[in-house]
Amino acid sequence: MSLIFRVETLAEIGSTNDALKARALSGTEEGVVLRADVQTAGKGRRGRNWVSEAGNLYMSMLLRPGKSPAEAATLGFVAAIALGRLLRAVLSVPVQHKWPNDVLVDDRKISGILLESGGVTGGKVDWLVLGIGVNLRHHPAETLYPTTDLLAVGGPALTPDQALDLLLGEFHPLYEAWLASGFAGVRADWLAHCRGLGEPIVARLEREEISGRFEDIDADGTLLLRMNSGELKRVAAGDIFMVPRPAA
Ligand code: BTN
């Protein structure tokens, strides 16, 4: 049966991801979407915080797709494709995907995705919480990667509710396609707009930094990095940075 979203809106919360995780653990059905005007403890990837003042979109959705942990982990790419489509529909500047799940507008990060999961029964995850933040009206200054927001790049003054409606509209058919055919069905879509593919990059991992050429992503979203030695490194988690081209 097709997924039906049930949107709940709050003025303020710690983290929409944390609140939905608690509900996932107490058995809430999939389809709940929690949006907050403000988060006081917004979470980013890899233990970072996500500045969450009023004006931007902060939302999480609870899903129970019945996928293995490896398959479930690719849902972040699906969400990034949905965000990319939404932004391309309202902007005339380049919109690209940055591995793993960021969306860049004019080469600056405009959104973030935090996918969390829990419990494995019979090889399938019990729940997924897909958290998405989109910079609509403002963006933080001090960040690992340059950032921007929709207004700053000449986009419309969307309210968080309008942005959420558009996002759910883009996400729903992609989610159904992913449920039916997995990441294989949407991988080409993500790659078609990928930033840095075939180019030199630096990957910052938990304990080291490695550099090489961004060769591809594989069937489970792992980044394949061709090192200068010729060795192919598989990068499952980390942050990547483009290597600036030398001036001509
Ligand atoms: C990133 O580091 O790029 C991921 C950021 C994810 C932020 C969103 S905002 C809504 C949801 N609730 C959170 O606490 N985090 C995610």
Image (cartoon, rainbow, N blue to C red):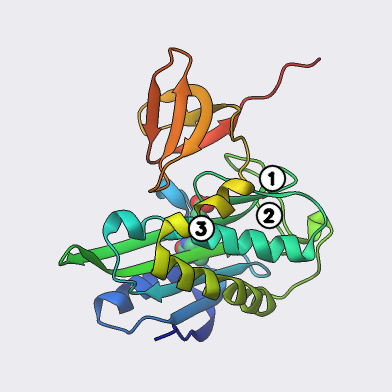
- Contact flag, marks 1 and 2 (Cβ < 8 Å): yes
Bin the neighbour count of mark 1 within 10 Å (Cα to Cα): few under 14, some 14-19, many 20 and up: some
Q: Nearer the viewer, mark 3 or mark 1?
A: 3
Q: Is residue 154 above or below residue 26?
A: above
Q: CA distance from mark 1 to mark 2?
A: 10 Å
The residue labelled by disc 1 is 108
Q: Which quadrant would the C terminus be assigned to in this image?
A: top right
Place of residue 53 in the rendered image (x, y in percent of width and height, measured from the top left): 62, 65
Instruction: Count all numbered tags in the image, as a single digit.
Output: 3
Q: Which mark is residue 186?
A: 3
| Among numbered discs 3 and 1, the one appearing first in the sequence | 1
Which secondary structure lies at badge 1? strand
SS class, disc 2: loop
Percent of width and height locating residue 195: 63, 40
Is the residue at mark 3 in contact range of ligand 1, meaning its CB lies under 8 Å from it?
A: no
Give the residue number, with chain letter if any, for mark 2. Answer: 139
Q: Amino acid at mark 3?
A: Val
Give how far across and how far down residue 85 sits, in percent. Answer: 66, 63
Q: In whole angstroms, how far apart are the C-alphas of marks 3 and 1?
A: 23 Å
Q: Is residue 73 left or right of residue 145?
A: left
- Closer to the chain start, of discs 2 and 3, is 2
Residue type at the position of mark 1: Arg
Residue 19 placement: quadrant: bottom left
- The foreground one among 18 and 11 is 18
| Nearer to the camera, 141 or 189 | 189
The image quadrant where one finds the N terminus is: bottom left
Q: Nearer the viewer, mark 1 or mark 2?
A: 1
Mark 2: which amino acid?
A: His
Apparent side of residue 7 relative to residue 104 in the rendered image (left or right): left
